[in-house]
Amino acid sequence: MIFGKPKPTVTPEDKEWIEDAFIWFEDQYGRDFLKNLRIVEPTKEFFNHQFTGTEADAEFALNKITEFMDIKGANIELYYFSEAPMEFEDEGVVVTQNTEGTGTKDTYALGKYSENGPNKFEIGLELKQLKNPQSMIATLAHELSHLILLGEGRIDENQEELTELNCIALGFGIFTSNSIFNFQQWQGTIHQGWQANRLGYIPEQVAAYAMAIFNNYQNNPTNWSEHLNKGIKKMYEKNLKYLNSNENASRFK
């Protein structure tokens, strides 16, 4: 049997867009910064905290993510809201991290970002996020990614897909990737079943290719991929095999 050459999980158009984005990230943060940046893992080493579903958890996570993303001199106020509908538009507020239940029309925001003056920012967090630390961290990282891109003047207009990719470039790929597709059991008074939700703005295959590119930056790769969900890990490994297949597979080595 003759096996074909390794292929990436993304289309040629998405592959080019992701690689162009990482070239831009190099210009923004420096190649050495990306090479020395550690991937943040869902472990006590990075989040030495007992998450119990309280607002104190979100405050702790926000402070740690700010530290990991090297955000300095920003006055950030964290507030909470409950299931904000998507039909409204608040002037000056970026409503992000939408969730949509598969097979339903229930859509609401998980996070919000806004600027209130020089170095003054507000980040909103949907209260249900407090019960899911990994999704909460992914949402807060996304909102802080808005601060880095929009708040620091790196881009002029909101770009949700680039904002999501920026989270991966700054070390939060595990949280971003694992939160894209959430499949969980629910149980009511009489009925029970399963519910699937899609979060964020990029599909799993795009996140997996971006994670593989980020891995090739690392000076000292670790076994962080063990924290990836089964599906995303399989795609990540396929992309890594593709990137390592030959020198012309990608612009990143």
Image (cartoon, rainbow, N blue to C red):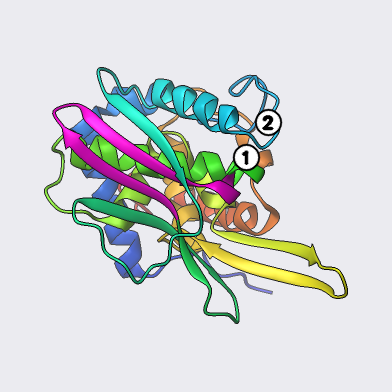
Residue at screen point 69% across, 63% down: 183
Can the viewer see residue 6?
A: no
Rendering coords of residue 232 (x, y %): 60, 56
Mark 1 highlights which residue?
133
Residue at screen point 13% across, 37% down: 153
Q: Main secondary structure of the magenta part?
A: strand
Q: Indicate yes or no whether the magenta region holds residue 125.
A: yes
Rendering coords of residue 171 (x, y %): 45, 34
Above or below: residue 75 compared with residue 93: above
Q: Indicate yes or no whether the magenta region holds residue 78.
A: no
Disc with the residue nearer the chain's start (2 vs 1): 2
**Extent of the magenta region:** 110-129
Q: Quadrant of residue 196?
A: bottom right
Q: Quadrant of residue 3?
A: bottom right
Looking at the picture, which amino acid does disc 1 mark? Pro
User: In the drawing, what numbered circle is on residue 226?
Assistant: none
User: In the drawing, what numbered circle is on residue 51?
Assistant: 2
Looking at the picture, which amino acid does disc 2 mark? Phe
